[in-house]
Amino acid sequence: MTKNIGIIVGSLRKESYNMKVALNMVKLFPDDYQVQIIDISQLPLYNQDYDDHDEVPAAWQTFRDTMKQVDAVLFVTPEYNRSIPAPLKNAIDVGSRPYGESVWDGKPAAVVSASTGAIGGALANMVLRQSLVFLNMPTVQQPEVYLGHVQNMLSDDGSFKDEGTTKFLQTLVDAFVKLIEKY
Ligand code: FNR
């Protein structure tokens, strides 16, 4: 059955390796899945006053409306200072409120981290999973995907140099699809 998948990329950088990984992964979903990259770059910083006083920024509303249409979420993120980048945490917070109206609740998730460092953003991956537990998002456990030295994996045109990388990511997408079909 057709599903809507939202991909959220933790980096706002124009030449982001994580965005390149995400764009490669769009093609790995079944043909009848609709997969879109969700822009989080324009979200004002979360401030509870906006929710409490009905002054929700337009960009928050658009994001919340878009995320409500999404059946499952793939996060692709770098690691910043052994945690997740602030824009990603901000998007998570914006989507989680107002209280009782979280856009995340019950939606299957999967996590990929990619970094120019050796451990592939493993700490960011784990930090993110901590929030996903609280947000009640059933998340693919295996395979774990940490892409270390990601800059060496990508060609100039943004594709993966080694077919093995695509094959590995396909195993994650297959596990994700299995999880999504259960819900
Ligand atoms: C980094 N980087 C980084 N890498 C890592 O493996 N662990 C870390 O804790 C950090 N910390 C960190 C903090 C900040 C502020 C920056 C800007 C960078 C390096 C990071 O992996 C690298 O810049 C990636 O290229 C970022 O991903 P994108 O933007 O290419 O998707």
Image (spheres, helix red, strand yellow):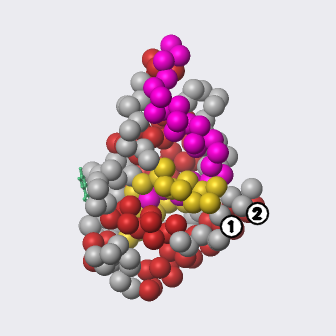
The magenta segment is: 52-76
In what element is the residue under mark 1?
Answer: loop
Q: Amino acid at mark 1?
A: Asp
Q: Is residue 1 left or right of residue 163?
A: right
Residue 115 in the image: x percent, y percent? Answer: 31, 64
Q: Amino acid at mark 2?
A: Met
* Image quadrant containing the N terminus: bottom right
Between 53 and 113, the one nearer to me in the picture:
53
Q: Is residue 132 left or right of residue 12?
A: right
Q: Residue at x 53, y 31 (%)?
A: 61
Residue 113 appearing in the image: yes
Where residue 30 sits, quadrant-wise, is bottom right
The span from disc 2 to disc 1 (Cα, nearest Å) is 7 Å
Local packing at callout 1 (Cα closer than 10 Å; few below 14, some 14-19, many 20+) is: few
The residue carrying mark 1 has its beta carbon less than 8 Å from ligand 1: no
Q: Residue at x 45, y 85 (%)?
A: 164
Which is nearer the N-term, disc 2 or disc 1?
Answer: 2
Q: Residue at x 35, y 83 (%)?
A: 161
The disc label shown at residue 1, or none:
2
| Residue wearing tag 1 | 32
Q: Residue furthest bottom?
A: 163
Is there CB contact under 8 Å for labels 2 and 1? yes
Q: Residue at x 27, y 72 (%)?
A: 151
Between 112 and 30, the one nearer to me in the picture:
30
Residue 160 in the image: x percent, y percent? Answer: 38, 79
* Image quadrant containing the C terminus: bottom right
Can residue 6 be found in the magenta stretch?
no
